[in-house]
Image (cartoon, coloured by chain):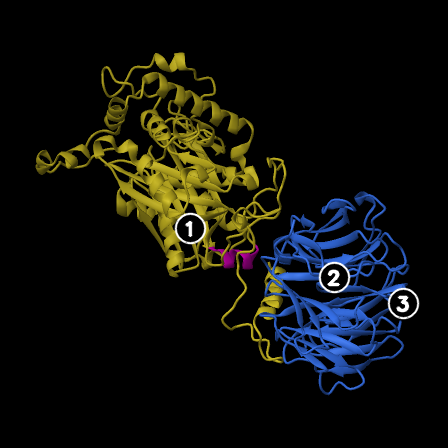
Chain colours: A yellow, B blue
Amino acid sequence: MEKATNRQRVLLEHLRPLNSSAHNYESSLSASACAAGDSAAYQRTSAYGDDVVIVAAYRTALCKSKRGGFKDTYPDDLLAPVLRALIEKTNLNPSEVGDIVVGTVLAPGSQRASECRMAAFYAGFPETVPLRTVNRQCSSGLQAVADVAAAIKAGFYDIGIGAGLESMTANPMAWEGSVNPKVEKFQKAQNCLLPMGITSENVAHRFGVTRQEQDQAAVESHRKAAAATSAGKFKDEIIPVATKIVDPKTGEEKPVTISVDDGIRPNTSVSELGKLKTVFKKDGTTTAGNSSQVSDGAGAVLLMKRSLAMHKGLPILGVFRTFAAVGVDPAIMGVGPAVAIPAAVKAAGLEIDDIDLFEINEAFASQFVYCRNKLEIDPEKVNVNGGAMAIGHPLGATGARCVATLLHEMKRRGKDCRFGVISMCIGTGMGAAAVFERGDCADELCNARKVENHGFLSKDAR
Amino acid sequence: MPVFKTPFNGYSVKFSPFYESRLAVATAQNFGILGNGRIHVLDLSPTAPTLSQLVSFDTADGVYDLSWSESHDSLLVAAIADGSVKIYDTALPPTANPIRSLHEHTREVHSTDYNPTRRDSFLTASWDDTIKLWTVDRPTSVRTFKEHAYCVYNAAWNPRHSDVFCSASGDCTLRIWDVREAGSTMIIPAHEFEILACDWNKYDDCVIASASVDKSIKLWDVRNYRVPIAVLNGHGYAVRRVKFSPHRRNVLASCSYDMTVCLWDFMVEDALVARYDHHTEFAVGVDMSVLVDGLLASTGWDELVYVWQQGMDPRAV
C-alpha cells in the first residue's frame, strides 16, 4: 500500500504546481486510501487502524446440562479456561486488557458477577483488569462482544474481552417470587411470561411452519454438526476443559477432559423425531427433538483496535462491523432474527445477498425455519456446522460461541467469504444481530473460481 | 485512423525503427498505481486502418516506458515500475521472455532510451534519482549517474554525439551528461517546477526541449542556456512528454495531463501547429515515426492507442 501511496504522491505533484524546493505533501490534495475496485487482481482493502477486530475467539465444548460432561463443573471453571486461552494463545499481557464483559442469563446477577470476577483471577488476570456482566437474555454473549466493540470505538480502552457463560445445570430456568398482578391488564407484558415453547408454537401456528419442516431442520442441524465434529472443524475453537464427573450412583469422582460437544446425535432421522410427543401444546409441533438443547458452556472473544493488533503482530480473525438489537411481539419472540438481521446488515451498508455466512441461533426449529425462509437466505449459507438444536444453547454463552464458530469457518473459507452474520431471537420479544467481516489472516484462496475474460478493471471504474 | 484498446492504462508508445508499421505500447493497471503491466507489440495493417496485436508480454508491475533496440529489429527494453529493467525479444513467444531482467534501480523506472548512434547501449531514468547506462550483453549496469536530488523522469541521447545525453528531473533541473566525464557537464535550472521530459532536436545537436509541470515547454541552446530560445505555452496542465520530429527541424510533439496532444513549430511566432483532443484521460505517451513522415502515435490513461497521420483527425474512421 505504501508504494501505491507514494506513486500517487509523485503523480499528484504533477497536477499541483508547487515551489521547486518544497515538496509539501500536507496540502489540499492527498493520496486516496482507496486504490482499486473489488474485482481487481489483488485484494481491495477497507482496513483502517481504528477498526475493531477480533484476534482470538474460543469456546468450551457445549455439554448437556445435568447429564453432560460439565454437570459437576462450577460455572467459573467453565469461564476461566477460555479466558486463559485468549491470553496464552495470543501471548498478550493480561494487564493490557481494559475490560472483560461477560454475557450471562440465568444465574442471580450479583452472584454471577462475583463468580466471573473470580474466574478472571483463576485465569491469571491481575486485579487491575475490571469485569462486568451483561444480560440480554439469549443474546447476552453477542451483546457482550458488541459492548466491548463499542467501548473500544468510543476510546474507553483499546483491548477488551467479550465473553459468555451459562451453566444451566447450576441455574435452571425459573421464576422467583410472585408476579405483579398488574400484568393482567397489559397483554404484551403478560406475553413476556409465556414459556419459550409456547412462543415457538405461536410462531409455527401463525406462520404455518409444519412439524415436518421443523424435524427436517433438526435432522440437518445434527447431521452438519456431526460432520463438522468428525472433520475436526471445531478443534480450532474448542478449548479442552479439565474437570471431574461424579458418578450419580456410586458418588465416585473421576477426572476428565471435555473437548467435544456431547449433544450431537449423528443418527437422528425425521421418522425418529416424528415419534416424539409435543411438549407445550397437545396438537402442537414443538418437541424436545426440534428445540435447542439445554446446555452448559462458555465462550470468549478478544477484541482490539486493528492498529494495535498489527503492532502486536496478532492475526486478525475478523472485523466487528455492526450490531443491532430490535424489539418484536413477545408472543412470537422467535421472529427476532427476521427483523434484527436486516437492521444490522443495512447499518453495515450491505444487503442480505452480500452476506456469505450466517449463524442463526436455533432456539426452536419453528422460528429458525421461519426466519430463514422470511429472509430468503440460501440454506447452504446458514449454520453450516450445525446449530443449537445439535450443539446446544447455553443461553448466555451462545453469542460468544457463535462468534468463535463463525469466524473460524470464515477463516477456513478464505477470501471468497467476506461477510458473516450472527443473530438470535431473545425471550420477551427481541432480536439481535451483528455483522462481521473476514480478517486478513484468512487462508489463501481455496475455493476461488476461475474468472473468464478478466477485464483487469475494477467494477466501479467501468 | 487506427485505434487499439488496451486492457490497462497506456503509459508509453514507441514506433519501431525497423518496421514502418510496427509499434510497441507500455501499459499499467490502475493508472500505474498498483497492479500488473503489459507490453503490446502492434502492427498497422497495410490495407485497412486497423492495429492488430503481434504479441504481448505481461509484467508483475506497471510498465512505464519502453524503447526499441536500434541494433536488433526484435529487441525491446522496458522500464518497469518495480524498479526492474527488462529486455524482450518479440520474435520469441511470451514464455521465453523476458530474455533479461535487470534489477538495480531501487524505485520505479520511468523512462528508457536506446542509443541511436552507437546502438549498443541504453539509458534508464528512475524515481530513485539516478540514471543508469546499460549494454544489452552485460548483466549489470555500466554506470550510474547520481546527481539529481529528486525523481529522474526522462533521459534522452543526443542524436549525433554518441556519448552525450540529457536528463529531466523533479528537482527542476535539466542536466547534460557526457559518459566519458565523471559528472554532469551542464546543469540547466530550466523551470521553476518539476521537469517531466526532455528531448534533443534531431537536426541541431545543440537544441533541447524540456517539458514541465509549469505547463510550458522550453527550448534551450546548450551553448547559451541563460535564456530559453523559445517558450511554448498552451497546455492546460503539466506536460508529460516531448518529442522532436525526425523529419522537420522545427517541429515537436507533446502530450499533457490536459488530455491533449499538441504539435508545435518553435521557430514561428504562433507556435501551436495542431491540438489533438482525442484522448479522454491524461495523454502520457506520444511518438513520431522515423520511417513515415508525419505519422504520429499516442496513448493515455483512457486505455486507447491512436495512430494517425499529421493533419488528420485521430478519431476519423
Q: Which residue is mark 3?
A: B117
Q: Decide which of tag 3 and tag 2 comes sooner along the chain.
A: 3
Contact, CB < 8 Å: mark 2 with mark 1? no
Q: Position of residue A44 (x, y in %)?
A: 55, 50
Give the alpha-carbon distance from disc 2 to disc 1, as whole Å: 63 Å
In the rendered image of this protein, does residue B64 appear above or below residue A338?
below
Residue A164 or residue B122, whichever sits in front: B122
Q: Is residue A309 magenta?
A: yes
Label 3 marks a residue whose chain is B
In the rendered image of this protein, does residue A458 appear above or below residue B81?
above
Tell me the crowding category of disc 3: few under 14, some 14 to 19, or many 20 or more residues within 10 angstroms, Cα based. some
Residue A64 or residue A153, whichever sits in front: A153
Callout 1 amino acid = Ile
Mark 1 vs mark 3, foreground winner is 3
| Numbered disc 1: secondary structure | strand
Secondary structure mainly formed by the magenta segment: helix
Tell me the crowding category of disc 2: few under 14, some 14 to 19, or many 20 or more residues within 10 angstroms, Cα based. many
Q: Which residues are magenta?
A: A305-313
Callout 2 amino acid = Asp
Tell me the crowding category of disc 1: few under 14, some 14 to 19, or many 20 or more residues within 10 angstroms, Cα based. many
B55 left or right of A240? right
Label 1 marks a residue whose chain is A
Q: Which residue is mark 1?
A: A161
